Each structure stands twice: as structure tokens, then as C-alpha cells.
Amino acid sequence: MNLSRDPKQRVVVGLSGGVDSAVTAHLLKQAGHEVVGIFMKNWEDDDDSEYCSSNIDFVDAAAVADVIGIEIEHVNFAADYKDRVFAAFLQEYQAGRTPNPDVLCNAEIKFKAFLDHAMRLGAEKIATGHYARVRERAGRFELLKGLDPLKDQSYFLHRLNQAQLAKTLFPVGDLPKTEVRRIAEEIGLPNAKKKDSTGICFIGERPFREFLNRYLAHQPGPIKDERGRKLGEHVGLSFYTLGQRQGLGIGGVKEKGAPRGGGAHEPWFVARKDLESNTLIVVQGHDHALLQSRSLVAEDLSWTGGAMPAFGGFGAKTRYRQADAPCALTPGEASIRLDFPQAQWAVTPGQSAVLYDGEVCLGGGVIAQALP
């Protein structure tokens, strides 16, 4: 993205308090655009806690705006967030699935509520600090991976549509993270060394089970191996995800003999949730057969180009931070089936299956079923 070639525009930047959005604003200002910063407050419950304080982030964002020389506005989207993102998040967990709220937050808040607000302010474009790119070809807009393979965030943006992509800039998508940090230090940004946030936006770094415990009904039940032998008690199926190894409370339990996929002293992993009997099924060994899937069905589809790709071969991610896995796509009326030549590990209902054609992110859907 050559920002200096773009016509000068009024661009509203989502300033989070982090270094990526700060450098985004700086690059746009340097290119001659009229830049306005918006700080989005998306969560209010216990926001003054040690884990998730938007007050500190706003102070950082305001300090960045001061250094860059732009205005900043504090906007509260907490009600929208609770209705559009958090309610769906809880509903999915209650149903035994593991949702990805960051995907929904991008589609419903950052590129809908925030975009709408920016347009009311007279913006021609919005910009965020995501590591992704937008390319226009013949009047159509493509979502591309960020050039830094370690930071690419196109997975979380796959539900964006043509109207949203047409209005969006991702200035740091062309840069490696090391260069973003270097620019931040060079221009004296106060958050140049601020560490990247890793928690879900409304949970922060707090213990996940402790947070969910406040909002979800939970019924303890048995933990069993694939042969039906009871190994312990779980605290509620909602608190576990497929492939989970930590926090099972059965670390000292060893099977006699070696089950398929692992030896007698291999760690235990969550393999299945049986909602009907309220049973958590675990297996020993990372490579156990019950953790492998060669196919999946995804629903609640969204395509960046506006239409489902045709039958054929693509790459897919079934979780963030994995390499694209070759797959064959079979379209259905309201779902898709993906078949993988290589088995995929811990394919998890509720997570997103995202399709790629090389560097182009095509969109995807929510995993409804993992198949052997």
C-alpha cells in the first residue's frame, strides 16, 4: 500500500492504545491525510480491574494522538458489543462450542458500528492496526494476508464484505512487526515498547474459567476416557475446549497399557464433549485418532467477494496461527464441506474455518462438525 499515492482523504483511525494502531495513524498523517483518532470502549463490566482496564489504554491512545498531532474521540460501543458479540459468545459456550469473539467483534463492532460512526464524522475511509491488506482489482476488493507471516490477522477479518473492504485501510499490513516497533521508537511514541495484548478484548489476561464462571450455568460431571472409564470430574463442559491439555485435574492418572495414539505416560487431551450425558471425553497422546479430522462442515458462511467460491482446491485454516492446509471445497446450500488430505488436529466446533487462494482470504464459516 503506497499511502502517498492515495488521494488525500479524511481517515478515522481506531486507536487502541497499542503500537500497531499508533503507527497506522502516524503513517497516514505522514502521507498527508486528515487523520482523526477514535478510541473504542467495548466493555464496561469490572473494567477497572487489573486484567482489563480500558482507562489505561485510553491514556496511551491519547498520548499517541498528542505526539502525532491528531484529535482523538472516546466512543462507547459497550451496549452494541454486549448485544452483538458477547450474547452470541455466551450462547455458543452454553451449547458446548468454542466461539471466536474476535472474528465477531471485527464484523459487528470495528467494521460496522465503528465504520458507521466514522462515516457520520465525514470520514472517507477508516483504518486499523491489523496486519492484513486490501487490494482493488477491476472495482472489486480483495482481502490479503499481512506480509509478516507471524502477525497476519486476515483470519480474524474474513467476515468483512465488499462495502467494508472498500472503506478500509490497513497501513501496517505491508510491514513486519519489527519495522512497526522501529518506526514507533524513531518518532518517540510513548507506547513503542508496549507489549502486544493476547487476551480476548473483554477478558484481557484474567483467568478464563474465573471469568466465564460469572456468566454461564455449569454442571459438574464425569471425565472419561474413550473406553468409558471414569478418570475424574469436570467443572462444567463450557469451560473446556477440544485439544485442551492444561487444567483437566487428571495429570496423575495413567492408563495401564498404551492406548492407540499414546503411551502410558503421555498427557491427556480433551477429545469430545457429550452434552447429553454431560461427559468430558479425554484421550492420551497429542496424535490420538480422536483428535484427528480429515473433514469438516462449516455453516454461517461469509465471503469477502460476496459469493461462495466454486468447487475446487484451496488452503484453509481451522485455527489462528496454523499454516494453510490444502483442502477440497464442496459447496452446499447453506454450508460447505472441506476435505483434507492430511488430518487436521483438534478441529473445534464454534471456531472459524477460513479459506485462502494463495495470499487472498476468500472468507469462510463457523465449524459445525468435525468428521474423522
Image: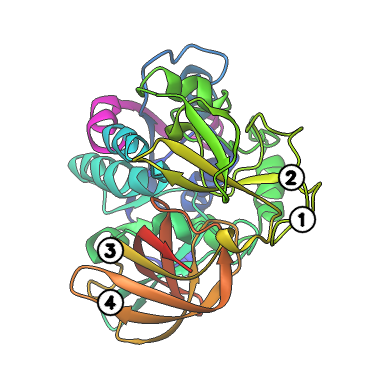
The answer to which of marks 1 and 4 sits earlier in the sequence is 4
Q: Are marks 1 and 3 in contact (CB under 8 Å)?
A: no
Give the SS element for disc 2: loop
Give the SS element for disc 4: strand
Q: Position of residue 63 (x, y in %)?
A: 54, 26
Label 1, label 3: how many angstroms apart (C-alpha)? 43 Å
Quarter of the figure with residue 40 = top left
Q: Position of residue 18 (x, y in %)?
A: 56, 36
- Number of numbered tags placed on the structure image: 4
Discs 1/3, front: 1
Q: What crowding class fits label 4: few (fewer than 14 Cα within 10 Å), some (14-19), or many (20 or more)?
A: few
Q: Nearer the viewer, residue 289 or 14?
A: 289
Q: Are marks 2 and 1 in contact (CB under 8 Å)?
A: yes
Q: Position of residue 191 (x, y in %)?
A: 63, 32
Q: Are marks 3 and 4 in contact (CB under 8 Å)?
A: no
Q: Which residue is mark 3?
A: 302
Q: Nearer the viewer, residue 217 or 306?
A: 217
Q: Are marks 1 and 4 in contact (CB under 8 Å)?
A: no
- Type of amino acid at the residue the image marks with label 2: Glu
The answer to which of marks 3 and 2 sits earlier in the sequence is 2
Discs 2/4, front: 2
Q: Position of residue 80 (x, y in %)?
A: 23, 32
Q: Nearer the viewer, residue 151 or 90?
A: 90
Q: Which residue is mark 4?
A: 140
Instruction: Determine if the magenta segment contains residue 77.
Output: yes
- Type of amino acid at the residue the image marks with label 4: Arg
- Type of amino acid at the residue the image marks with label 3: Ser
The answer to which of marks 1 and 3 sits earlier in the sequence is 1
Q: Which residue is mark 2?
A: 255
Q: Which residue is mark 1?
A: 258
